[in-house]
Amino acid sequence: MNSLLAELLLLRRRTATWILLGFWTTIALLFSYVLPYYAYTANTNFHGRGIVLYVLLPQNLVSTITATFPFFGGTMILILGVLSMGSEYNWGTLTTVLVQRDSRLKFFLAKIAALAIAIVPFVLLVFLLGFLTSSIIALREDQAIILPSLWDLVRALSIGWFLLAVWASFGVLLAVLSKGTALAIGLGIIYGLVLEGIISSFGRQIDLLDQISKGLLRTNGYSLISTLGGSVTAEVGPGGFSGTTVSGTQASIVFGVYILLFVAISALVIRLRDVTGTS
Amino acid sequence: MPSDYVIESENLTKRYRPHIMAVDGLDMQARRGEVYGFVGPNGAGKTTALRMFLGLVRPSSGSCMVLGQKPGAPDALARIGALVETPAFYPYLSGRNNLRVLARHAGVSYSRIEPVLEEVELSGRGNDRFKTYSLGMKQRLGMAAALLKDPELLILDEPTNGLDPAGMAEMRHLIRNLGQGNRTVLLSSHLMGELEQICDRIGVVKDGKIVAEGSLDELRHGTRLKLRAKPVEKARELLASLDGVSQTEIQDPDILIIEADPSLAADINRLLVGAGIDVSELTTTQNSLESVFLSLTGEVRSHE
């Protein structure tokens, strides 16, 4: 418990945590509500205009806001995971902490638990602000403010947390393997923002890549949130996803396996590898 | 029954790649309550050895017990304070908050933080961020962190790095005080003067091995006599055959250094004067730790 409190103190006091939280909520709202609503108000004559407004209303909060999680949310939290673990190598603080009392495993599990807790505000805040924004849109458009059902909301929050937790553990793994932050963030961003998208798009032409894409984080993320209703596919724009989706159950299992694998490999490396100073 | 030795290593070896031998069969014992100096040139393997004692680096072979337990065992770590290489802390946290984080990890009450900050004279800057500290202040915070657990064993790696002369003197004074009573201090340094003033026993490390170990007097080979005599060669021949004189060495044209009990000084003087040798100086002298170190490690100084 003491170690967990120490790790929470580190995350809470770190400016980067708050910057990532602010940046994530800003871009989530921007792409979920602000830009679509601007397009809706600026163009009065386009096909499907009614559907755009419908998606922006509070009753569709869970499907609209969660659509940003597999792409932006995942990348933001990957960076948080990398910073949380990788900085210990950059600053040499791993040595300082590991000579206190905790075993390596206890230290690592405390860090993972602290990250799992730190993700909660990343989920809650974006939902809260999403609800406020959609309510404002509803009021402006003379629409009723209808809340999603409590069950849908709980499911969406859980799925959102689960999805971000996978990416955070992926960030931790990259940081542990690269013993730092720079390479881990670089590789993570390239993987999350570029590589998965390319594999998914080529998957439409190459069957093997289509099969591979079914095991990737983004595909499974979009598959998981598609169980909340609404459409997750978009051909264009940042985070556009047009690949094959899998069932919600399969996506949950794949994500569960990923978390276990990422955490287990990181823990094993931390336990076995010599701590030799700053990297 | 608890062992007299706080640290015991036997044939402790760390090989990084087939051709990089960082520590090569290190045998050493640090006794309870002593200040043990670990001295050696850069790259001799001191820090790697300290990291092995703390469980940060796993040995390739050999064995080691620290406070009666395997290195890195949580129960042993709870009784060890350590400052290894440069002090590493979270730059965005204040000194005080850094110590809070470490206190949490160590399971130590926050009430220990103020006394240790005061002990290293950092109370006034405790709320400033670590990244704003000077090197000396960082070193002192490292010392505060090492003292947080009120440890039985202190492992300090170059604790005076970055300190100004006054800070170094204060640190030496602090370490000497900390080494009193039952607390053991293992102090690694390449500053001979520092070790000479603080340590009860010293282990000289070269190429990952202890090449000499003992008290300061043992390492300096006791007290020697320095003679200024003319003709110096004749004096040397005479004294070489004298009982109680184990070694003679001509240093300067007129100066002869001999290893002998100082109580023989009067007999030596009488013998030399009786043989018609002019003796203008006869004093006791000691080898400095530095000269012992240089002769043991084969290090050569370019300037004296």
Image: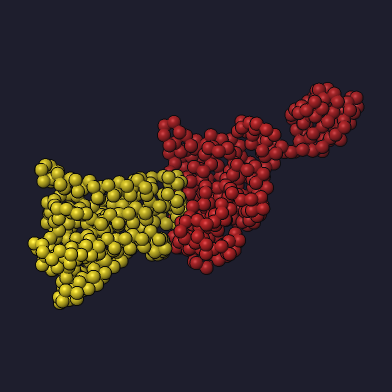
* Chain B image colour: red
Q: Is residue A183 left or right of residue B221?
A: left
Q: Is residue B210 left or right of residue A246?
A: right
Residue A55 showing in the rendered view: no
Q: Is residue B195 above or below residue B281?
A: below
Of A239 and A164, the residue lying toward us: A239
Residue A27 showing in the rendered view: yes
Residue drawn at the location 44% of the way across and 41% of the way down: B59
Q: Position of residue A128 (x, y in %)?
A: 26, 70
Q: Is residue B103 above or below residue A203?
A: below
Of A89 and A32, the residue lying toward us: A32
Of B296 and B12, the residue lying toward us: B296
Q: Is residue A149 above or below residue A247?
A: below
Of B67 and A76, the residue lying toward us: A76
Q: Is residue A3 left or right of residue B207?
A: left
Residue drawn at the location 30% of the way across and 46% of the way down: A187
Quadrant into which the N terminus of chain A falls: bottom left
Q: How are the colours assigned in the image?
A: by chain
Quadrant into which the C terminus of chain A falls: top left
Q: Position of residue A226 (x, y in %)?
A: 14, 60
Residue drawn at the location 87% of the way across and 32% of the way down: B280
Kindly indicate which chain is depicted in yellow in the rendered structure. Answer: A
Q: Position of residue A104 (x, y in %)?
A: 39, 53
